[in-house]
Image: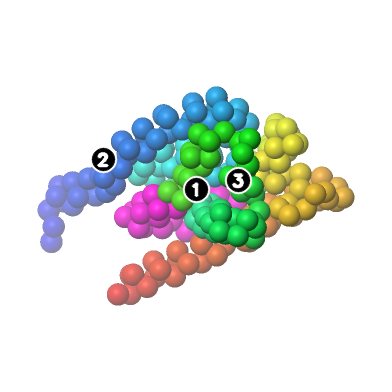
Amino acid sequence: MLDPKLEHSRRSRPRLPLPLKLAFTAWVLVWAPSIITLLGPQNFFWICNLANFLILIGLWTESRLLLSMQWLSVALIGFFWGIDVGMAWLTGVHPIGGTAYMLDPDFPVAAKLLSFYHLALPVISGFAVYRLSYDSRALPWQAGLIALLVPLSWWLTDPERNVNMVHVPLGLDQIDWPALIYLLLLVLAWVVILLLPVHALSQWLQRRGQVE
């Protein structure tokens, strides 16, 4: 039987590498002021942009819940973002939508380069969840955060920005549904399309790891 002091020491020992925490802190310190300068503070209402701050907090506190929540949000967003940008560069067509700014010559080049964080966040949050294990409470908590963020985006950001698609969905120029109904359906879509598949996969992988 392990010495209780040794067991406590093992449990309290940091499980996420310090270089990762420092590197991500440096990234946020560069990225956040740049976004404010280039695009304005309203850009932080995007779910994937907010994730930068929450992942930073999660890394330093080694919070399973917070990192699992952000893993749910960024995993498929990063995947779809990469597919859309890659296909657009190869074919000139955006199969999903939402990344047209990456081929817009008038969009700041610096902002385009910073946008590649979409590919890094799933790797960072996924690694953190792998080290700490997935917290199944992440699904209701992240769904609640999205349910809060969507109406705030509709209320506090400019309509032409269409932050989190709160005014029109991808691929459509307009929508005639009442705002309340649309926002409720949008929250449901975020949860069903983006969160649930990653939640189910994470739980399956965790159960498989426990069995093995």
Residue to which mark 1 is pinned: 118
* Residue under the image location 55 percent in, 65 percent down: 197
Q: Is residue 41 depicted above or below 93 in this figure?
A: above
The part of the image, by quadrant, that contains residue 21 is top left
Amino acid residing under circle 3: Leu
Task: Give the SS element for disc 1.
Answer: helix
Judge from the rendering whether residue 128 lies leftward or rightward of residue 70; answer left or right.
left
Q: Mark 2: which secondary structure?
A: helix
Crowding at mark 3 (Cα within 10 Å: few <14, some 14-19, many 20+): some
What's the amino acid at mark 1? Answer: His
Tag nearer the camera, 2 or 3: 3
Pointers 1 and 2 in contact (C-beta within 8 Å): no
Residue 85 appears at what percent x and percent y? 56, 53
Q: Main secondary structure of the magenta part?
A: helix
The residue that appears at 40% across and 42% down in the rendered structure is 58
In the image, 47: left or right of 5? right
Q: Give the residue type at disc 2.
A: Leu
Whether residues under marks 1 and 3 lie with C-beta atoms below 8 angstroms apart, the answer is no
Residue at image position (47%, 59%) is 136
Where residue 92 sits, quadrant-wise, is bottom right
Q: Which mark is residue 18?
A: 2
Q: Is residue 173 left or right of residue 115?
A: right
User: Residue at position x 31%, y 55% from top?
Assistant: 131
Q: Position of residue 212 (x, y in %)?
A: 30, 75
Is residue 137 positioned above or below 53 on the image?
A: below
In the rendered structure, are the residues bearing label 2 and label 3 in contact, judged by CB atoms less than 8 Å apart? no
Q: Which mark is residue 103?
A: 3
**What is the magenta range?**
122-143
Task: Quadrant for residue 46, please give it.
Answer: top right
Marks 2 and 3, Cα distance to the nearest angstrom?
A: 36 Å
